[in-house]
Amino acid sequence: MVDPTSDLNEDVSEDDAPTCAVCGDALVQDPDHRVVTRVRDGEVQTTHFCSDAHRDEWTD
C-alpha cells in the first residue's frame, strides 16, 4: 500500500491505492476520501473511506 501521507493524485495505480473499508473501492484521485488514524499496541493503524457516509457506517 502507498504511504497514506503521500500525494495520491500522482503515479498511484488502483492496485497500490488504499481501499474503502466499507465498499472496497480503490481510492485514487478521490477528493472526498476520509481516513481514521489510531494507535493500538504502539502501532499506527489507518482505515480509509470513500465518503462521509461510509465513514459513518463503519464500526471497528
Image: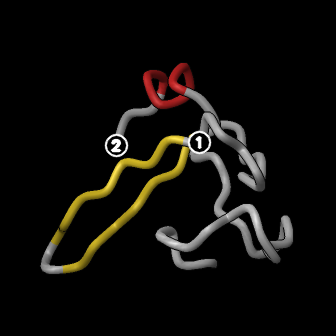
Return the residue at label 2: 60
Q: Is residue 10 above or below residue 54?
A: below
- Secondary element type, mark 2: loop
Return the residue at label 1: 33
Disc 2: CA contacts within 10 A as few (<14), some (14-19) or many (>=20):
few
Closer to the camera in the image, 19 or 10: 10
Image disc number at residue 53: none
Quadrant the N terminus occupies: bottom right
Q: Position of residue 57 (x, y in %)?
A: 48, 23
Q: Is residue 46 above or below residue 3?
A: above
* 1 or 2: mark nearer the eye: 1
- Secondary element type, mark 1: loop
Residue sitting at the far left? 42
Q: Amino acid at mark 1?
A: His
Q: Point out the tag, 1 or 2, that comes first from the N-terminus.
A: 1
Disc 1: CA contacts within 10 A as few (<14), some (14-19) or many (>=20):
some
Q: Residue at x 18, y 68 (%)?
A: 40
Q: Position of residue 29 (x, y in %)?
A: 76, 51
Q: Position of residue 23 (x, y in %)?
A: 70, 38
